[in-house]
């Protein structure tokens, strides 16, 4: 019996020695503590529910959340399991609001002067938790639908889209230039 307990102790010790402990994800107020890309922020919106349905406040400049005014908006969708990205903007920030579905927003910060230079950041957005998030200029980002239905997103970019000279730079989702792997997910 002692031989078995020694083997069992060895297995426990060897597996624990190879294991990686989960990192803390919430602070004392139960708010997420995942690191964000430098210059990125959230604004929790308000959803009013009653027996008829709901009203969700999407954007109000009086909130003072973002210094740039609302000048343009559009809606985009992503089908389940697909990825849009990698994309980067030199002249503007994106400001996302997920209406429905579940979105994994993956960001890579190549800005040499940034405190998050070379870092990957992931945030999860859902129609169940209405909030705005901004994506700073010069940050690569990819949008992945991790839900089972189409994700619907409103974007409030800080400049109007210029069809003759788009402020959009792309890399394939499987590029070796960004240290992130989407596995078998498809997209561009």
Image (spheres, grey):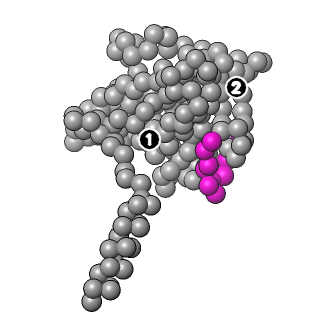
Residue 108: % across, % down: 58, 33
Which numbered dot is residue 75? none
Highlighted range, magenta: 179-188
SS assignment for the magenta stretch, majority? loop
Quadrant of residue 177 within the rendered picture = top right
Identified at 57% across, 53% down, the residue is 81
Q: Do the residues labelled 1 and 2 touch (CB within 8 Å)?
A: no
Q: Quadrant of the N terminus?
A: bottom left
Q: Is residue 185 magenta?
A: yes
Identified at 44% across, 61% down, the residue is 18
Of 48 and 20, which appears nearest the observer? Answer: 20
Identified at 78% across, 18% down, the residue is 164
Of 162 and 16, which appears nearest the observer? Answer: 16
Q: Quadrant of the C terminus?
A: top right
**Position of 86 relative to 185 (above/below):** above
Quadrant of residue 183 within the rendered picture = bottom right
The residue that label 2 is drawn on is: 168
Figure label count:
2
Residue 175: % across, % down: 71, 43
The residue that label 1 is drawn on is: 124
């Amino acid at each position: 019996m002692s031989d078995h307990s020694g083997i069992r102790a060895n297995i426990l010790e060897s597996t624990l020695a190879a294991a990686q402990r989960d990192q803390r994800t919430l602070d004392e107020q139960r708010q997420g503590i995942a690191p964000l890309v430098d210059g990125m922020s959230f604004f929790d919106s308000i959803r009013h529910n009653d027996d008829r349905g709901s009203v969700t406040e999407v954007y109000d400049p009086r909130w003072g959340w973002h210094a740039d005014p609302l000048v343009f908006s559009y809606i985009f969708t992503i089908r389940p399991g697909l990825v849009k990205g990698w994309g980067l903007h030199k002249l503007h920030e994106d400001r996302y609001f997920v209406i429905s579905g579940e979105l994994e927003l993956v960001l890579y910060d190549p800005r040499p002067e940034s405190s998050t230079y070379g870092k990957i950041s992931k945030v999860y957005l859902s129609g169940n938790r209405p909030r705005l998030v901004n994506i700073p200029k010069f940050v690569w980002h990819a949008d992945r639908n991790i839900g089972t239905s189409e994700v619907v997103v409103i974007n409030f970019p800080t400049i109007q889209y210029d069809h003759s000279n788009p402020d959009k730079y792309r890399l394939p989702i499987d590029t070796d230039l960004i240290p992130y792997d989407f596995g078998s997910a498809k997209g561009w």
